[in-house]
Image (cartoon, grey):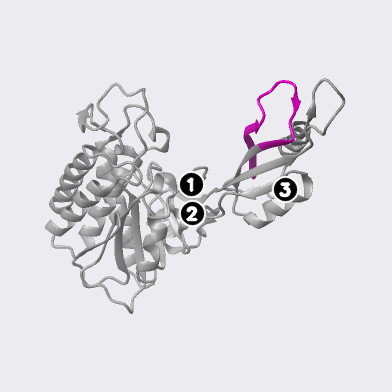
């Protein structure tokens, strides 16, 4: 690591320590947005802000050139009860940096900011760069990246910072949550009355459990349906329920549209099916895409990610890659190795070098 990159690394770690020390639960990220905004302003970067989303363009942004979006989030989940360390104290131990949001996704965010600053004043880039620190990612909120994208210049593709051990998540499962309602007729349990909605729901749930969609992705595997909630309105033991509700969690691969999944389910069960949202769709960036090819040249492996990120809300190709390990996300005593941040900065710089210093 040369001297300028070493400075970027030290500044990135210091910024991450500030972010850890500042609570930033989803919808409550205003203080970390302030910190990021002020950090970039001190680096003489012209910063824009929309709600709690902070973004900036490279110094010599040229509308005639294509644009790469560098994005990660600065909101966190709430700390779980298993913490033995203060989640809001950035503690360095055994070459690790502990603290809430250190791994998901603070390390990615500060590494992307460092890479952005590395190229910020370059005049010879073939692509523009935009850095965006977004809000509400952990809840897939509508005031996060989804709110910001319409306010950005046209984007050719994005690099999304999430902990992937700096391997390339080229595909990502979509998430669709379905509210299902089985209708029956109320009656007294002691007499042969009514139509039991619970039994109708059980029949439908049995179909969900046993049905398999036949298109299997080489990156994401099969579509996965799981019934996670079931309830009836009445609590009396002697009343045949007239209505039974259940919830299906559907993880969709890139080979199906949500509409195809919905049509298949509705044709095969009697319950009424209502999707809560169809926003978090599955996505894939082709192996032939220049940024993926750049990663392959660097020796990076690629895979399909079972988790959902802001990549799902982007209407352009996006590669998910970043320092840290997804297995540490949302765990007690969350941490990231300092070396992961150092290597993350170098890898982001090298990945971009393949893309923005050559003609698109």
Residue 252 tag number: none
Disc nearest the viewer among 1 and 3: 3
Q: Is residue 347 above or below residue 41?
A: above
Q: Is residue 11 above or below residue 150?
A: above
Over which residues does the magenta segment extend?
223-245
Marks 2 & 1, CB-CB < 8 Å contact: yes
Q: Is residue 45 visible?
A: yes
On screen, residue 309 versus residue 43, left or right, reads right
Label 1: element kind: loop
Label 2: element kind: helix
Residue 265 tag number: 3
Q: Residue sitting at 41 percent across and 38 percent down?
A: 326
Dot 3 or dot 2: first in sequence order is 3
Say few, some or many: other residues with alpha carbon within 10 Å of mark 3 (under 14 / 14 to 19 / 20 or more).
some
Residue 308 tag number: 1
Q: Position of residue 93 (x, y in %)?
A: 21, 27
Q: Residue sitting at 33 percent across and 45 percent down?
A: 75
Dot 1 or dot 3: first in sequence order is 3
On screen, residue 189 versus residue 39, left or right, reads right
Residue 142 lies within the magenta run:
no
Residue 312 tag number: 2
Q: Position of residue 167 (x, y in %)?
A: 42, 46
Q: Quadrant of residue 337?
A: top left
Q: In this rendered view, identify the residue nearer to me: 357 or 191.
A: 191
Say few, some or many: other residues with alpha carbon within 10 Å of mark 1 (under 14 / 14 to 19 / 20 or more).
many
On screen, residue 190 versus residue 345, left or right, reads right
Q: In this rendered view, identify the residue nearer to me: 266 or 329.
A: 266
């Amino acid at each position: 690591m040369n001297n300028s990159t070493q400075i970027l690394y030290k500044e990135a770690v210091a910024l991450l320590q500030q972010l850890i020390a500042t609570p930033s639960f989803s919808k409550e990220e205003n203080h970390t947005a302030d910190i990021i905004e002020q950090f970039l302003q001190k680096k003489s970067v012209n910063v824009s802000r929309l709600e709690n989303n902070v973004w900036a363009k490279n110094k010599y942004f040229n509308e005639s050139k294509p644009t790469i979006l560098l994005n990660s989030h600065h909101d966190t989940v709430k700390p779980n009860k298993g913490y033995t360390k203060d989640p809001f104290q950035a503690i360095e131990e055994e070459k690790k940096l502990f603290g809430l949001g250190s791994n998901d996704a603070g390390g990615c965010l500060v590494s992307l900011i460092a890479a952005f600053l590395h190229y910020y004043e370059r005049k010879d880039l073939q692509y523009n760069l935009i850095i965006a620190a977004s809000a509400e990612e952990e809840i897939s909120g509508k005031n996060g990246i989804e709110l910001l994208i319409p306010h950005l210049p046209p984007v050719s593709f994005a690099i999304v910072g999430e902990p992937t051990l700096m391997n390339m998540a080229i595909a990502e499962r979509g998430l669709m949550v379905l509210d299902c309602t089985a209708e029956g007729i109320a009656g007294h349990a002691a007499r042969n009355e009514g139509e039991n909605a619970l039994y109708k729901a059980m029949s439908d749930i049995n179909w969900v459990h046993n049905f398999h969609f036949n298109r299997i992705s080489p990156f994401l595997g099969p579509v996965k349906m799981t019934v996670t909630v079931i309830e009836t309105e009445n609590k009396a033991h002697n009343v045949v329920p007239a209505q039974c509700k259940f919830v299906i969690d559907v993880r969709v691969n890139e080979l199906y549209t949500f509409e195809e999944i919905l049509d298949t389910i509705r044709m095969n069960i009697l319950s009424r099916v209502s999707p809560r949202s169809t926003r978090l769709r599955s996505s894939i960036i082709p192996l032939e895409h220049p940024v993926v090819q750049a990663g392959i040249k660097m020796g990076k492996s690629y895979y399909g990610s079972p988790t959902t990120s802001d990549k799902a809300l982007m209407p352009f190709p996006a590669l998910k890659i970043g320092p840290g390990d997804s297995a540490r996300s949302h765990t007690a005593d969350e941490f990231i190795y300092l070396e992961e941040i150092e290597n993350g900065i170098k890898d982001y710089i090298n990945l971009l070098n393949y893309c923005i210093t050559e003609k698109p």
